[in-house]
Amino acid sequence: MILRVTKYGEPILRKVGKPITEFNAELAKLANDMVDTMYDEEGIGLAAQQIDQALQLCVVDVRPPEGAEVPFNYSFDGKQPPLDLIMPMAIANPKITILDATEEVYEEGCLSFPGVNGRVDRPIGVRCEFQDTEGNSHVIEADGLLGRCILHEVDHLQGKLFIDIMYKRDLKKNETKIKKLKRETRDFLKGR
C-alpha cells in the first residue's frame, strides 16, 4: 500500500522515534508499505517519520541498475551476499558506529523535501547494528552510497534532517523552495 509522505514543516519529522518492541505481522506490513512507498516516490530510503510514525524503523534499497557494478563496499553479518538477497532492507532499532570518520561530500535529496538537493558531508565508513522485522539481529558495514543512505535515514529516526547539515551555500540556494514547502505544509495541515 502506498502511504502519504510527510513534508518539511510537519512536526513528526523532528520527533525521535520510539524503539520497536513488537516484531509481528503488523510491523512486517508497515515495512512492506514503506518499501512500496519508497519505490513509488523513486527514493532509495524512507524513515518511519516520513510516513507519519515516530518509530525507530527505516527501509533502504540502493541496488544499482541491472548489469551495473556495485559502487560501494559492504558486508552483511560478516559476509557479502548478493544485494538482491538483502535488499530492500528494513532496519529497526539501528545503532550506528562510524568506522571511517573521513568525510565525503555528496549531493543529497530527500523525499520530504521535493525538488531540494544540496551537498552534505558524511563519514565514509559506517557500521549499523539493527533488527529485521522478525526481531533478528544483524550487522551491516558499508561505505559509499549505502553507508550514506543508512546515515541519512538514521538521522530521520533521531529527528535530524539533511538541511541541518547541508552546505550553507546550498541551503541558501534552496531557501526559497524550502520556505515555499513549509508554507504549503502549513496550509495543508490547517486544511486537514
Image: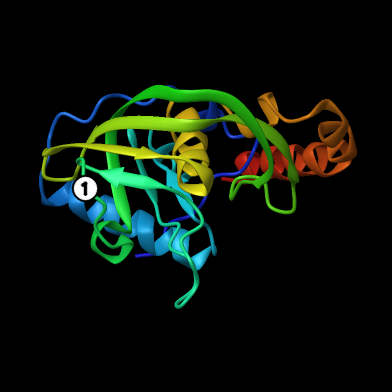
Is residue 142 shown left or right of residue 139?
right
Q: Which residue lies furthest to the bottom in this view?
A: 67
User: For this view, does 51 lie left or right of residue 95?
Assistant: right
Horizontal side of residue 154 vs 191, given as left or right: left
The quarter of the picture where residue 88 lies is bottom left
- Dividing the picture into quadrants, the one containing residue 173 is top right
Residue 84, compared with residue 21, is above or below; it is: below
Residue that carries the numbered disc 1 in the rendered image: 79
Relative image position of residue 145 (x, y in whole percent): 52, 48
User: Which of 39 and 165 lies nearest the eye of the viewer?
Assistant: 165
Q: Quadrant of the C terminus?
A: top right
Q: What element carries label 1?
A: loop
Image: 40 above or below 31 = below
Position of the N terminus, as image quadrant, is bottom left
Give above or below for 46 relative to 82: above
* Image side of residue 141 versus residue 130, left or right: right
Q: Judge the density around disc 1: few (<14), some (14-19), many (≥20) Cα neighbours within 10 Å.
A: few
Q: Residue at x 28, y 51 (%)?
A: 31
Give the percent coordinates (x, y) of residue 32.
Answer: 28, 58
Residue drawn at x 83%, y 36% as measured from the top left: 170
Q: What residue type is labelled 1?
A: Lys
Name the image colouring.
rainbow
User: Where is residue 118 drawn, in percent x and y?
Assistant: 75, 41
The residue positioned 42% from the left and 25% from the top of the image is: 99
Q: Which residue is drawn at 47% across and 50% down?
A: 72
Front residue of 78 and 48 = 78
Is residue 156 visible in the rendered structure shown here? no
